[in-house]
């Protein structure tokens, strides 16, 4: 296994699975060579513009995800029949240094991609997507990668004086030549929460934008096809970047910037599973879940369900996985 120096592996004792009740936790392997999906936590929220708390999400989402059963009643997919998950632990972030944290995350994700693993990254705030996508592109030899972003916000703020925030990742990626705007799809954008300047920037960059209200009026299968067509045009594959504030606060109140009118839980879960089921899906980051702002645990539970939908889609895309 290539060295990934910035990772802090989790300690866990494998428990023989009960065949009557196999859970996601039972699918873990300690051998990356025997896995197909790598889970990586990034407990960092220093760069968030709004309310903090997302640094506690990786541990909370893991607990909720690992309690879920391996059998998905809705799709009939049994993750125990093929999918193997290696949990590489958490990146050793530097809470006082977003730039150094970016460097470490980028190095880790590049290494994960070079091992042939598809990363499932649990953040953390959305500033981290600059590092996760940069690392993925590096791991794929610099070849172009598409991105389908679920978010209430464009995250196209100008990084003034080099500032790194949760509002700047996609501007940094595009202006840094890492991501082409024509390969970016933004789904779930909220009215009244995005400025004219950034909407015009999205048009100038050639980004395909879909508002939350357009999602509510859309056929989800047609929307998924539209997003895939754009993200796969001239790319080696695509990455999902999922900000939990894309959901209406009725479903996910524990986020940095809750936004009324967002997606329903069903819409988000169906779209993630559908997109993750495409063979060209290269991974996903899941950001902006803030457990301290989530007293009844519903946001963490939904975030775990989003991660689970990604795993189910991956099992459908790669039915012969080891």
Image (spheres, rainbow, N blue to C red):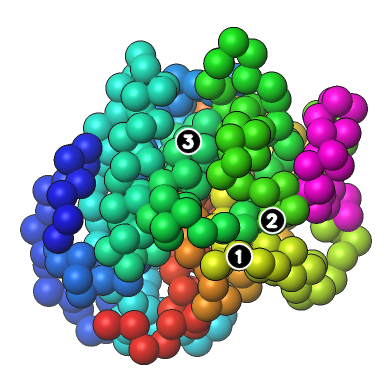
Give the quarter of the image for residue 237: bottom right
Quarter assignment of residue 193 = top right
Q: Nearer the viewer, mark 3 or mark 2?
A: 2
Are the residues at dot 2 and dot 1 in contact (C-beta closer than 8 Å)?
Answer: yes
Q: Bounds of the magenta span?
A: 194-214
Name the residue at 51% across, 40% down: 129
Q: Is tag 2's residue or tag 1's residue first in the polypeptide sequence?
A: 2
Q: Nearer the viewer, residue 42 or 1?
A: 1
147 left or right of 116? Answer: right
Q: For the residue labelled by badge 1, is the local secondary structure a helix, a strand or a loop?
A: loop
Q: Nearer the viewer, mark 1 or mark 3?
A: 1
The answer to whether residue 174 is left or right of residue 319 is: right
Q: Residue at x 20, y 65 (%)?
A: 32
The answer to if 229 sits in the magenta stretch is no
Q: Relative to residue 142, is residue 245 depicted above or below?
A: above
Coordinates of residue 253 in the picture (x, y in percent): 62, 36
Which quadrant: the C terminus? bottom left
Point 42% across, 60% down: residue = 140
Q: Earlier in the sequence, mark 3 or mark 2?
A: 3
- Residue at 57% x, 58% y: name it: 145
- Name the one closer to the observer, 182 or 88: 182
The residue labelled by disc 2 is 183
Q: Is residue 229 visible?
A: yes
Q: Helix, strand or loop at disc 2? A: helix
**Mark number for residue 128?**
3
Residue at which label 1 appears: 235
Q: Position of residue 291 (x, y in %)?
A: 45, 34
């Amino acid at each position: 296994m290539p060295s990934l120096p910035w990772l802090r592996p989790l300690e866990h004792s494998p428990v023989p699975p009960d065949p009557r009740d196999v859970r996601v936790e039972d699918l873990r392997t300690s051998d990356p060579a025997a896995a197909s999906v790598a889970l990586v936590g990034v407990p960092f929220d220093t760069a968030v513009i709004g309310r903090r708390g997302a640094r506690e999400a990786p541990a909370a989402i893991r607990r909720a995800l690992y309690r879920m059963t391996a059998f998905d009643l809705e799709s009939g997919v049994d993750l125990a029949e093929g999918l193997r998950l290696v949990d590489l632990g958490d990146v050793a972030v530097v809470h006082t240094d977003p730039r150094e944290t970016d460097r470490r995350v980028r190095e880790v994700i590049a290494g994960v991609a070079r091992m042939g693993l598809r990363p499932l990254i649990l953040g953390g705030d959305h500033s981290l997507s600059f590092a996760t996508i940069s690392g993925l592109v590096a791991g794929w030899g610099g070849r172009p990668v598409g991105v389908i972003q679920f978010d209430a916000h464009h995250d196209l703020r100008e990084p003034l004086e080099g500032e790194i925030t949760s509002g700047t990742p996609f501007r940094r990626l595009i202006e840094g030549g890492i991501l082409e705007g024509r390969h970016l799809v933004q789904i779930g954008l909220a009215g009244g929460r995005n400025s004219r300047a950034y909407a015009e920037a999205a048009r100038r960059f050639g980004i395909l934008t879909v508002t939350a209200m357009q999602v509510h009026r859309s056929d989800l299968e047609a929307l998924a096809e539209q997003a895939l067509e754009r993200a796969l045009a001239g790319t080696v594959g695509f990455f999902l970047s999922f900000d939990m504030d894309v959901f209406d606060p009725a479903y996910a109140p524990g986020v940095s910037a809750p936004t009324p009118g967002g997606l329903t839980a069903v819409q988000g879960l169906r779209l993630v599973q559908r997109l993750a089921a495409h063979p060209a899906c290269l991974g996903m980051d899941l950001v902006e879940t803030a457990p301290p702002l989530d007293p009844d645990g519903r946001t963490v539970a939904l975030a775990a369900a989003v991660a689970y939908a990604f795993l189910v889609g991956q099992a459908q895309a790669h039915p012969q996985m080891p």
